[in-house]
Image: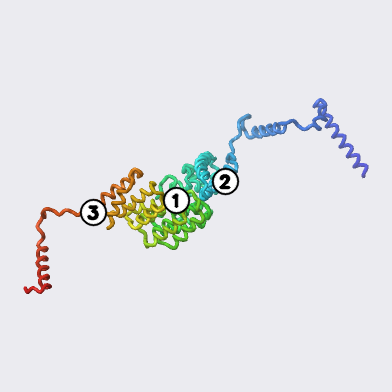
Amino acid sequence: MRGGALFLLLALACLSAGAGGAIAAGDHGESAKAESTPPPEGAEAGHGEATDNAKAAEGGEAEGEPPPEPLWPEMPAVELDKQPYVLVRSLRSVQDEVASGSTTAHELQRKLLRDYGEQMRDLPVGVWDDVRNVRAAIFFVLSGGDPAVLKTVIGRKKTPFIERRLLKGALAYGEGRLVDALSMIHKIEARKLDPLLGGMIALIQGTLIGKKDIKKAIDFFDEARLLAPGTLIEESALRQQILLLAREGEVERFDVLASQYSRRFPRSLFARNFRRQFFAGVARQNYKRASEWVSRTESELMKVPAAERVGLYLSIAEEATKGGNIDIAKFAANKARDLSQPGSRAVERAKLFEGASLVATDEFERGVELLNQVDVAKLGASDREVRESALAVARSVGKWPEAPEKLEEAPPEAVGRAQTLLSKVDSLLEGVPQ
């Protein structure tokens, strides 16, 4: 039995060798070389193409006709560093440096807003099917970026409902349609969004509604600060919230947040302008519990660098004079005079505002004296107008009105009866019998 199996195996081996010899004869003896040498480059591809052509012929297509386009063409790849959500991370980092006082970051932010806008407009539309990129585009436009970026994004059907609503609101905000923007986003719950986008949305909500509903705006700013601590979002929310609290007369919260701003963002690029805005606002507004604000203003000014105080006191004096807040104007003008160098422009302006504030009071003569002492050559055009107006008021206050030569009309009959009655009363009081 074993011998028969062995014979069968040998017979099969011979048949196989014979077939190989036939192939070798047909290839002119190159068979061995072909077995030991790999096929040349493109041989497999050529074989594949022949197979494909054969399949196409079987399907009835003409040889050489291009294959049909795929139903779902692949979108061109976008490198990670060009994805919008990655670009906006860089923007956020730069913004936070602005809050820390970096002038270089402030210039860089402008450049990034311009450059990133151009990059985002040129991206393939498939990029916007990633919700992270949609949120990044919203943040970008609310930060001051080109709103045209959103026009491509809005049409994508894969965008979730909340983001679609935010897209429309952000586009309206970027285009200056603030009423439409508020109607789109004011009911959105910022806490349910990605924290940094939520902080930005709450900030914009507070900014837009501030003129209509101060208390609601203050609540929105609270949310913005909680969602984005340590960022430019928190810095901006604090600035706006402090002014609203001052206007509402919420003294205790004002004190807390003003101290917090001084502690957390003392070097912010917006801090100096904010202080001017704040102190000028204090002088200009008719605040509730106004008597407390002079002492609070003084305590806040003590935290400001000495070189900056003169300008702040002059801003307060100017706004208080124009707003008719005489006590504040006198207080600030006197402080400015005490801190200014003799003969400086600041001294002349301080005398101007103090004199202008006094001419409408019992001290109008002192006011006129100060106004006449001012060196007009050191005043700007607007300050000169203030001086001329104040002197005109002084002339009116110090002058008795001229009595008319005659009454144009006879006094009413009631006046005559009243005079007769008063004469009788005088006679009774003097004991003269009637």
Task: State how far apart marks 3 and 2 are (Cα).
Answer: 70 Å
Q: Nearer the viewer, mark 3 or mark 2?
A: 3
Task: State how far apart marks 3 and 1 are (Cα).
Answer: 37 Å
Residue 4 x, y percent position in the rendering: 91, 42
Q: Secondary structure at mark 1?
A: helix
Image quadrant in which the N terminus is located: top right
Decide if residue 432 is on the left or right side of residue 297.
left
Mark 2–mark 1 CB contact (< 8 Å) = no
In the image, farthest residue toward the left = 434
Q: Nearer the viewer, mark 3 or mark 1?
A: 3
Q: Secondary structure at mark 3?
A: loop
Residue 294 x, y percent position in the rendering: 39, 59
Image quadrant in which the C terminus is located: bottom left
Residue 82 figure quarter = top right
Question: What's under tag 1, amino acid-wise?
Answer: Glu
Closer to the camera in the image, 254 or 385: 385
Q: Which residue is at 45% across, 60% downward?
A: 255
Question: What's under tag 3, amino acid-wise?
Answer: Gly
**Res 308 label:** 1
| Above or below, 73 relative to 204 | above
| Above or below, 237 relative to 31 | below
Q: Nearer the viewer, mark 2 or mark 1?
A: 1
Precedes in sequence: disc 3 or disc 2: 2
Q: Please name the residue that numbered disc 3 is placed on.
A: 398
Q: Please name the residue that numbered disc 2 is placed on.
A: 86
Task: State how far apart marks 2 and 1 are (Cα).
Answer: 40 Å
**Could one spot residue 371 in this view of the protein?**
yes
Mark 3–mark 1 CB contact (< 8 Å) = no
**Could one spot residue 182 in this view of the protein?**
no
Q: Which residue is at 39% across, 56% downward?
A: 282
Number of other residues with Cα within 10 Å of mark 2, as a class: few under 14, some 14 to 19, many 20 or more: some
